[in-house]
Image: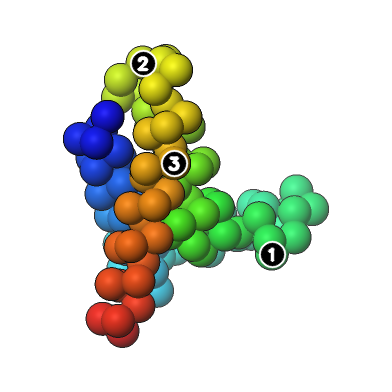
Amino acid sequence: MILKSLIISLIITAIYSSMQEGMLLGNMRIGIKKFLDSLGFSDFWHKPFCDCLTCMGGIYTVILYPLLYGFSMEMLPTMLVVIGLNSIISKFLSLEL
């Protein structure tokens, strides 16, 4: 489970880092925000999709885990570990800036 969590966490970190301004997926982040706004979602909903590495852990684990490993009851504890890992990684990324 730890290895699965680490793999998913690093994938999410790569997505998050790539969505920053000036990076490869920077325009995709803007598009996601505009799409969520057009659906009537508030700024609060930007966080789990593209603005907060820790928040992205929950949504993206639900998407990535079944794609990589199939459905399993192990997904919930894996999600919690991913959120914890992303929280730690987020602290290191904020020190870098």
**Residue 19, percent from left and from top:** 39, 62
For the residues carrying marks 1 and 3, which lies nearer the camera in this image? Answer: 3
| Residue 3 falls left or right of residue 39 | left
Tell me the residue at 47%/29% (across/down): 76
Identity of the residue drawn at 35% across and 78% down: 94
Is any part of residue 31 visible from this angle? no
Q: How many marks?
A: 3
Across and down, in percent, residue 71 comes to 42, 15
In this view, the residue in front, 66 or 38, is 66
Q: Which structural element holds mark 2? A: loop
Q: Which quadrant, please, contains the N terminus? A: top left
The image's mark for residue 80 is: 3
Looking at the rendered structure, the secondary structure element under dot 1 is: helix
Image quarter (top left, top right, bottom left or bottom right) of the C terminus:
bottom left
Inter-mark Cα distance, 2 to 3? 17 Å
Q: Position of residue 61 (x, y in %)?
A: 42, 37
Q: Residue at x 30, y 20 (%)?
A: 69
Q: Is residue 6 above or below residue 23?
A: above
Circle 1 is placed at which residue position? 43
Q: Earlier in the sequence, mark 1 or mark 2?
A: 1
Residue named by callout 2: 70
Q: Kindly identify the residue that appears in the image at 30 percent across and 81 percent down.
A: 95
Q: Looking at the image, can residue 88 be seen?
A: yes
- The amino acid marked with disc number 1 is Asp
Q: Which mark is residue 13?
A: none
Which residue occupies the extreme right position in the image?
40
Q: Is residue 75 above or below residue 90?
A: above
Marked residue nearer the N-terminal end (1 or 3): 1
Residue type of the residue flagged with mark 2: Gly
Mark 2 or mark 3, whichever is nearer to me: 3
Q: How is the image coloured?
A: rainbow
Q: Quadrant of residue 81?
A: top left
